[in-house]
């Protein structure tokens, strides 16, 4: 039996896509991984959350994933010690960072290289250099580096100098919201966008683009994902868009599912990403997708989305106008999205991850 210590120090219930990846991956590994046992090295916060998805023992680390200094120390040093203490054959760090050195072989999943490729868009500049240093150290120690797109794989080679022979690319999958939807046009009156308010998400650009859409066809826009005071509110008020833009902040899964069932389309105006889970999940339920024309999003969405230039407000506004005035286009995007999303599954993610584990163990 192969014992894997899973680094769950960053899992606090606030990390969005990386937590979705960890949760869905390990739920699936619990079904398909034969000959493996998993030990989760958990943050203080995870112990207060539902962790029934984890297919093994959860052990407390005593480390807060929300305290950056304690968390960084834990990633660099405590994870490796815990692996030795629990007799692990392998470490998996699923959230980009992990041990600086370890006698136990390590697989680290690096989702993106945004601190390297777009440091100007990171919301905490003082944090950028330490993260870059940590990513460099972790990549040197790792037996295998897992990543989620060809774009991210190329950037890991470029910025961290990791040899391609040590990189395994396993695309993500979506988790379909629990809504009833069939391919076909919807009423053009509601767009949704979701995500945190970090600068690279470009929600300010989306709100400003809404002001350029003619009032006669302008849809409503609901933007979820903020915690605390929403930095988009002053822009909405400045542009007089209160009738059209609703800022809902952090929503429950039930609230999000209700939005999916009502929405005309999902909009993703990001400047940069490592993958693109929200559009993939929208496609799974027949929700048309409008998103930034980036190589990584083309990689995910293929011809199943309507693309725009995220740096050009008129391009964003044009895509919105085109979508809400063309039911035929929305119906076509919905059908293409269903077909595109069917190419991805968490079983494929789990099996690709196990292949990476096996390579790391063989290298030992």
Image: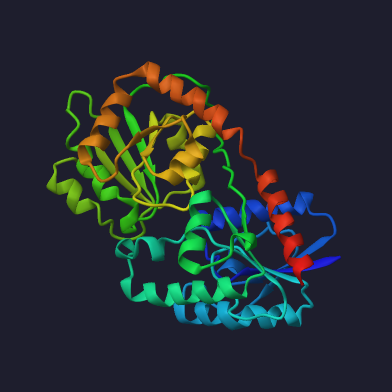
Asked if residue 44 shows in the view, the reply is no
Q: Position of residue 3 (x, y in %)?
A: 79, 68
Q: Position of residue 24 (x, y in %)?
A: 63, 51
| Residue at 34% over, 58% down | 198
Q: Is residue 97 above or below residue 28?
A: below
Q: Position of residue 307 (x, y in %)?
A: 36, 35
Q: Is residue 304 above or below residue 205?
A: above
| Residue at 45% over, 39% down | 298
Judge by depth and name the residue closer to the eye, 231 or 301.
Answer: 301
Q: Is residue 215 above or below residue 88?
A: above
| Residue at 44% over, 72% down | 132
Residue 355 sits in which quadrant? bottom right
Judge by depth and name the residue closer to the eye, 46 or 172.
Answer: 172
Quadrant including the N terminus? bottom right
Judge by depth and name the residue closer to the eye, 20 or 256.
Answer: 20
Total numbered badges shown on the rendered structure: 0
| Residue at 52% over, 66% down | 12
Residue 290 sits in which quadrant? top left
Quadrant including the C terminus? bottom right
Q: How is the image coloured?
A: rainbow
Asked if residue 230 shows in the view, the reply is yes
Judge by depth and name the residue closer to the eye, 168 or 84.
Answer: 168
Q: Position of residue 86 (x, y in %)?
A: 76, 78
Tell whether 325 sits left or right of 94.
Answer: left
Q: Residue furthest top?
A: 328
């Amino acid at each position: 039996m192969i014992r894997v210590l899973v680094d769950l120090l960053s899992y606090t219930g606030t990390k969005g896509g990386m937590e979705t990846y960890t949760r869905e991956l390990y739920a699936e590994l619990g079904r398909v991984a034969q000959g493996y046992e998993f030990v989760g090295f958990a943050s203080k916060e995870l112990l207060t959350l539902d962790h029934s998805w984890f297919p093994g023992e959860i052990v407390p680390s005593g480390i807060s994933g929300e305290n950056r200094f304690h968390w960084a120390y834990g990633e660099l040093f405590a994870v490796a010690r815990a692996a030795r203490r629990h007799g692990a054959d392998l470490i998996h760090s699923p959230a980009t960072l992990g041990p600086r050195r370890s006698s136990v072989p390590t697989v680290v999943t690096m989702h993106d290289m945004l601190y390297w490729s777009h440091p100007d868009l990171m919301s905490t500049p003082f944090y950028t250099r330490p993260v870059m240093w940590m990513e460099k150290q972790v990549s040197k120690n790792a037996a295998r580096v897992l990543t989620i797109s060809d774009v991210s794989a190329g950037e890991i080679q470029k910025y961290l100098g990791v040899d391609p022979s040590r990189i395994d690319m396993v695309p993500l999958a979506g988790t379909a919201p629990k809504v009833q939807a069939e391919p076909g046009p919807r009423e053009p009156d509601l767009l949704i966008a979701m995500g945190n308010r970090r600068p690279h998400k470009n929600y300010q650009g989306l709100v400003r683009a809404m002001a350029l859409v003619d009032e006669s066809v302008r849809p409503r826009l609901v933007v979820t994902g903020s915690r605390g005071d929403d930095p988009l509110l002053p822009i909405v008020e400045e542009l007089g868009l209160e009738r059209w833009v609703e800022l809902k902040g952090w929503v429950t899964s039930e609230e999000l599912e209700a939005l999916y069932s009502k929405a005309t389309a999902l909009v993703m105006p990001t400047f940069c990403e490592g993958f693109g889970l929200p559009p993939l999940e929208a496609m799974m339920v027949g929700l048309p997708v409008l998103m930034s024309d980036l190589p990584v999003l083309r990689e995910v969405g293929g011809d199943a989305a309507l693309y725009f230039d995220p740096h050009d407000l008129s391009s964003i506004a044009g895509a919105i106008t085109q979508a809400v005035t063309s039911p035929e286009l929305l119906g076509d995007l919905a059908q293409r999205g269903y077909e595109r999303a069917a190419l991805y599954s968490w079983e494929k993610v789990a099996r690709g991850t196990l292949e990476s584990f096996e390579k790391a163990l063989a290298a030992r």
